């Protein structure tokens, strides 16, 4: 389901909401929790950082271009409500906090679900860790509050 953007200069259709699960939104040089937590994050570990980040230079080019391409440095004007799930102990924690603060600064409604001691994209481990299942229930509850049940949606 989507609606027209409230901006008169744009005719883009916008979704009614967005769910961001452990969002990786800063393609510039690793800093903060991305550097600190890759030592214990099970998914984005040191080898992912060492191999992955140089690829950004190859695919996106200069630091300036990587910054312009990074979602966290783009405009948040007219975005729909967001539901964000993150762990305080994963590599993208700082990026996610920046994203949430930037969205809220332009009055985008943001609901945050935060867990401790989980790795990046822990939500997708819901068959293995209770926090993953809890986070997916959090997302489903947000969607139901936002849009109603499946029975109330138009065909």
Image (cartoon, rainbow, N blue to C red):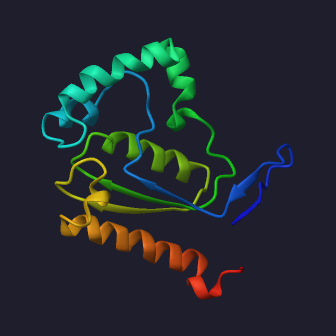
At 19% from the left and 37% from the top, the residue drawn is 37
The structure residue drawn at horizontal position 52% and vertical position 45%, both measured from the top left corner, is 102
Residue 149 image position (x, y, % from top left): 56, 84
- 128 w.r.t. 96: above or below: below
Q: Is residue 59 above or below residue 103?
A: above
Residue drawn at x 52%, y 79% is 144
Q: Return the residue nearer the eye: 142 or 54.
A: 54
Residue 122 spot, x, y in % from top left? 27, 55
The quarter of the picture where the N terminus appears is: bottom right
Task: Report the residue that reaches farthest toward the bottom.
Answer: 151
User: Does residue 122 appear to the left or right of 73 in the view shown?
Assistant: left
Residue at 25% over, 21% down: 50
Q: Identify the image quadrant of the C terminus.
A: bottom right
In the shown orientation, is residue 69 left or right of residue 24?
right
Q: Quadrant of residue 141?
A: bottom left
- Vertical position of residue 43 compared to residue 144: above or below: above
Residue at the extreme left:
40
Most foreground residue, 155 or 6? 155
Q: Quadrant of residue 48?
A: top left
Q: Is residue 81 above or below residue 147?
A: above
């Amino acid at each position: 389901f989507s609606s027209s953007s409230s901006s008169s200069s744009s005719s883009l259709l916008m979704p009614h909401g967005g769910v961001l699960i452990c969002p990786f939104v800063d393609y510039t040089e690793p800093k903060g929790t991305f550097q600190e937590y890759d030592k214990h994050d099970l998914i984005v570990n040191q080898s992912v950082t060492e191999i992955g980040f140089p690829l950004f230079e190859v695919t996106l080019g200069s630091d300036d271009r990587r910054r312009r391409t990074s979602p966290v440095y783009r405009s948040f004007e007219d975005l729909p409500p967001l539901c964000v799930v993150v762990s305080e102990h994963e590599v993208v924690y700082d990026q996610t906090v920046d994203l949430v603060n930037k969205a809220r600064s332009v009055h985008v409604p943001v609901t945050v679900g935060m867990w401790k001691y989980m790795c990046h994209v822990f939500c997708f481990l819901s068959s293995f860790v209770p926090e993953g299942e809890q986070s997916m229930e959090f997302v489903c509850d947000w969607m139901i509050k936002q849009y109603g049940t499946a029975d109330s949606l138009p065909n």
